[in-house]
Amino acid sequence: MKIAVLTDSSAYLSKEDQEKYHIDVIPIPIIWGDKTYKDLIDIGYEEFYQKLEHAETLPTTSQPSTGEVQKYLDRYVDEGYTDVFIIPISSGLSSFYSSLVNIAKEEKRIKIHLFDPKITCAGEADAALLAGKLVQAGASPDLIMHDLEDLRKTMDIRFMVDDLNHLKRTGRLSNATSFMGTLLHIKPILSMDVQGEGKISAIAKERQYKRAYKHVQNDFAKLTSEMPYPIQCTVFDSLDPVREKEWLADYREKFPEIKFNTAIIGPVVGVHVGQHTMALIWCRDVDSYFDENGKPIAGINSKEVQD
């Protein structure tokens, strides 16, 4: 058995992790006027936000074509892979997952294991990394899927956008109609329904940034306290390095028992949230799915207390 792992560019996996865990990344297209850009290939991180700041025409996103996906599957078949785990952006944010369902029904040469993480960015990356690590450790497809589903149960997210109009414009805010009328001097706090449909919604609002920041931190403290497993958390932003540094230092000081990482909100997700978005995604520590020798702990569930 030979297993591949494929995700899309909205996970924003580092090149180092892609190479270390042999994870392939299919770029998501960005449509800007009469041009189409491949995420982080034809347009870079800083370049995108600089262009967005002064753009008269705003971008939209599409999904990778069936032909693009087929190129990866053809290569896997040629290289002797028997299985592939595909972990795309949340089905609540894109129709890409539905397209992959149809491809999986038709493909007979290789077994496609399709996993909907119901999240994007660092949460999607965490799922892809867990799959990649499990493949390297020799886990079976059943165990990989079991652990991916278990990891998803532990995930949550809080984020704040500088301009809610991007989410409204692109139709990615599920409760936009009920929330938009209260935006004057309001800082919205958003989340994703990771345990449901994987959609974005505004869950609270505060009258200034500092109060919104404290609200997010209180949510994080409450929701991560007394968990029966170790937590990892990613602080990530859409080109706001000053706030990212401030958030990371503050969280590391206040929650020393939690592992913190950083990542980016790249162009494809930036189309929908705009610049200066700040976010937290947390979940069970991916490393806790392995024993001290790096072997998968079979059948583990997050409700179990780990010694």
Image: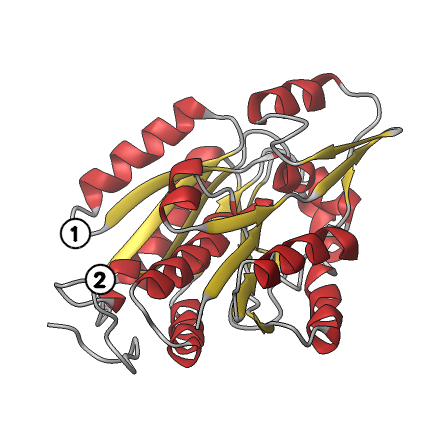
Q: Examine the rendering and report whether any part of residue 104 can be seen.
A: yes
Q: Which residue appears at 68% of the width and 27% of the height?
A: 42
Q: Nearer the viewer, residue 140 or 287?
A: 140
108 relative position to 123: left or right:
right
Q: Which residue appears at 41% of the width and 43% of the height?
A: 19
Q: Nearer the viewer, residue 50 or 71?
A: 71
Disc 2 crowd, CA 10 A, few/some/many (<14, 14-19, 20+)? some
Q: Quadrant of the N terminus?
A: bottom left
Please, what secondary structure does the residue beneath circle 2 have?
Answer: loop
Residue type highlighted by circle 1: Glu
Residue receiving disc 2? 230
The mark that comes first in sequence, 1 or 2, is 2
Residue type highlighted by circle 2: Pro
Q: Which residue appears at 70% of the width and 66% of the height?
A: 100
158 above or below 162? below
Q: Which quadrant of the structure image shows residue 193?
A: bottom right
Q: Which residue appears at 34% of the width and 54% of the height?
A: 220
Please, what secondary structure does the residue beneath circle 1 have?
Answer: loop
Q: Position of residue 143 (x, y in %)?
A: 37, 78
Q: Which quadrant of the structure image shows residue 74?
A: bottom right
- Number of marks in the rendered image: 2
Residue receiving disc 1? 257
94 above or below 209? below
88 relative position to 299: left or right:
right
Disc 1 + disc 2, Cβ < 8 Å: yes
